[in-house]
Structure formats: C-alpha cells, structure tokens
Amino acid sequence: MVKKPDLRLGPRALTDSLFRIRKRLGGFNYEKINKQLHDALKLHKTQNDTTAHRAWIKSLLIDYYDSMYEYQLSTKSDRIVFTGNRDDVLEKTRKIPTKSILFKLILYI
C-alpha cells in the first residue's frame, strides 16, 4: 500500500521552498521575504495569529510570480491570439460558434 504524502506545509517546508528560489528572487528580495516569513511563523506559533503571512505572500507574488509570469508571457507572445480585460474576453467568447461550447465553458470558469 502506498502511503499518501502529508500535504500540509509546515514551517520547514515553507522556508526550504523559499530557499530553493532565492537566486531567482535576488538577494535583497530573498532576505526581505525570508524575514517576513520568519516573523509570520513566529507570530503564528506564539499567538496563533496568521495575518502576518499576508506580507510574505504578497511580496512573493509581486517579486517572484509577477515577473515570472511576464517573462513566460513574453516568450510565448507569438501564440497569443487575443488579449483584453474580463469584459473584452467575455464579448469575444460570445462570438465563438456554438460547436465550440467547451472552449466557452473553459473561459467562463
């Protein structure tokens, strides 16, 4: 019987994961987020207060994932067939023939 992995992220898993992307974050961003993470973990442990986790998560989203998304988007720009805000996308999908309903459903989800 295969044992299911424990998917809960403990403090060690979070700090290890952050360490693995430190080069992509750069030294300054890594140190900033690492401090925010440790401060949040301490507050969480001592006072059962999870609100400080928002700071490091926000920094990680902005400093790592936003730039990674932009980079990936730029490398695939030749495959982009349409861009727009939510309303533009919804309007564009209304013009797709009914036989492409699966495509419409995926976009609305």
Image (spheres, grey):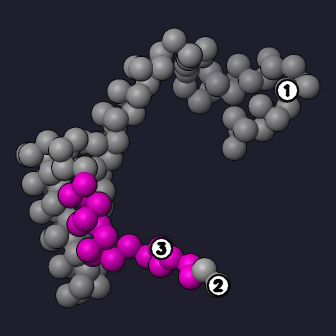
Residue drawn 18% across and 44% down? Answer: 23
The quarter holding residue 13 reads: bottom left
Task: Tell me if mark 3 has few (under 14), some (14-19) or many (20+) residues whose alpha carbon lies within 10 angstroms of its own.
Answer: few
Q: Nearer the viewer, mark 2 or mark 3?
A: 2
Q: Label 3's element? A: loop
Pick the residue in front: 76 or 35: 76
- State the residue at coordinates (59%, 30%): 86
**Marks 2 and 3, the one that precedes in the sequence:** 2
- For the record, the magenta segment spans 3-20
Q: Residue furthest top?
A: 78
Q: Tell me, for residue 7, which label it has, or none.
A: 3
Query: Which amino acid, by three-letter code, is at mark 3?
Result: Leu
First reached walking from the N terminus: tag 3 or tag 1: 3
Residue at position x 47%, y 73% in the image: 7
CA neighbours of label 2 inside 10 A, class few (<14), some (14 to 19), many (20+):
few
Which numbered tag is attached to residue 100?
Answer: 1
Q: Secondary structure at mark 2?
A: loop
Badge 1, how many Cα within 10 Å: few under 14, some, many 20+?
few
Secondary structure under the numbered disc 1 in the rendered image = helix
Q: Nearer the viewer, mark 3 or mark 1?
A: 3
Total labels drawn: 3
